[in-house]
């Protein structure tokens, strides 16, 4: 039996992945770019018993580390991905898997990027194989969570459109310290999965127009990260965060991920800017708002979000180095 543990962080997209060419392989219609986080992470332990033909076991660890059987909704895509990796490595055998999220399960924050990145990397280690970064990223993507392709790397990460559909580094986390202050306004599961949203995207009359802007936005994002130019990057982050939702709301049938509280936070972020803070908002496929800012403005941004009635919880995160094996196993 071989065992490995990996902790992989979530990421927040500055240029959003929305729309697929091939849903089962998570091949995107367009490029995206993200910042890998530090605190919001999934830790996964995988044990592999070669040649055993018993079913795989999938467990969830609670905050205290106690293991419970995962429900079917969680376990099924995990087992599907284990099958994919077992076939890829051509290694018959059986897996035992346990996962723990560092952020509160009820925070309504997507954990699929961190979860599938950690699962992919821990499984590869347990199988005693460690392909190059592009292959690790492409394998994580095939979980069905495309954004997991970016979480296998740290710092600033691009997932270009084309070639092997793997993510690539843009800059390490040490290049530029940016923070992500997350205003949690919604803790219920999202009304429509991102898998479904990706497929509906082309039905928006504005989708082709959006695609035509993306090559230039990717260039601007890369250049402003290289130059540590937040005055240039910030507005792009917020444009992208809003435009994703213009596409979802104009898809057929439409998808409304925002809640009234989302708009309240967006208003407060605009007020922060009028008061001289460098803060720009972005949202993934959900109602929660990620406020990106430089470290010197983080305490004030967090305090103002925390004082809002509409905000249930504030999580202070920031750019991080990416997955690590320097963590205790879950079993
Ligand atoms: O990783 P998926 O397939 O759940 O898609 C996530 C898409 C967004 O989070 C909305 C944007 C992104 O690029 O992360």
Image: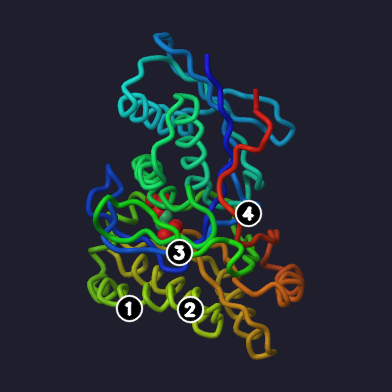
Q: Earlier in the sequence, mark 2 or mark 1?
A: 1
Query: How far is mark 4 from mark 3, CA to CA?
Result: 17 Å
**Residue under label 4:** 38
Q: CA distance from mark 3 to mark 1?
A: 16 Å
Q: CA distance from mark 1 to mark 4?
A: 28 Å
Residue annotated with mark 1: 216
Q: Position of residue 308 (x, y in %)?
A: 72, 71
| First reached walking from the N terminus: tag 2 or tag 4 | 4
Which comes before the other along the chain, label 3 or label 1?
3
Q: Is residue 1 left or right of residue 23?
A: right
Residue 192 in sight in this render:
no
Residue 328 is situated, as x and y percent measured from the top left of the image, at 68, 31
Q: Secondary structure at mark 3?
A: strand
Question: Is the residue marked 3 within 8 Å of ligand 1, measured from its CB?
Answer: no
Label 1 vs 4, first from the N-terminus: 4
Residue located beneath label 2 in the image = 224
The residue tagged 3 is 170
Residue 193 image point, x, y percent: 40, 50
Judge depth for marks 3 and 1 and give the one in front: 3
Q: Residue visible at 75% across and 76% down?
A: 300
Q: Are marks 4 and 3 in contact (CB under 8 Å)?
A: no
Would residue 276 be visible to someone looking at this image? yes
């Amino acid at each position: 039996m071989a065992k490995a543990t990996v902790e992989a962080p979530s990421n927040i997209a500055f240029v959003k992945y929305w729309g697929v060419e091939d849903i089962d392989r998570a091949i995107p219609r367009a490029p995206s770019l993200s910042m890998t986080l530090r605190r919001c992470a999934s830790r996964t332990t995988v044990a592999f018993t070669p040649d055993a033909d018993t079913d795989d076991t999938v467990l969830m660890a609670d905050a205290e580390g106690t293991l419970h059987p995962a429900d079917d909704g969680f376990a099924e895509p995990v087992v599907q991905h284990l099958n994919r990796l077992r076939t890829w490595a051509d290694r018959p055998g059986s897996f035992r898997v346990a996962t723990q999220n560092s952020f509160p399960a009820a925070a309504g924050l997507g954990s699929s990027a961190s979860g599938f990145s950690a699962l992919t990397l821990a499984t590869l280690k347990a199988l005693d194989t460690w392909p190059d970064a592009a292959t690790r990223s492409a394998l994580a993507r095939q979980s069905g969570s495309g954004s997991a392709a970016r979480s296998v790397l740290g710092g600033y990460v691009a997932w270009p459109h084309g070639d092997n559909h793997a993510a690539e580094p843009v800059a390490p986390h040490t290049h530029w310290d940016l923070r992500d202050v997350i205003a949690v306004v919604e803790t219920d599961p999202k009304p429509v999965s991102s898998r479904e949203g990706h497929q509906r995207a082309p039905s928006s009359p504005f989708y082709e127009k959006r695609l035509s802007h993306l090559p230039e936005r990717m260039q601007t994002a890369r250049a402003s990260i290289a130059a540590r130019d937040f005055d240039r990057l910030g507005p792009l982050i917020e444009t992208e965060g809003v435009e994703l939702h213009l596409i979802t709301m104009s898809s057929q049938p439409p998808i409304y991920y925002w809640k009234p509280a989302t708009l309240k936070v967006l208003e407060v972020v605009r007020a922060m800017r009028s008061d001289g803070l460098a803060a720009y908002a972005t949202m993934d496929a959900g109602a929660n708002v990620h406020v990106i800012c430089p470290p010197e403005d983080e305490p004030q941004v967090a305090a103002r979000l925390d004082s809002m009635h509409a905000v249930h919880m504030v999580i202070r995160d920031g750019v991080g180095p990416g997955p690590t094996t320097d963590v205790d196993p879950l079993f």
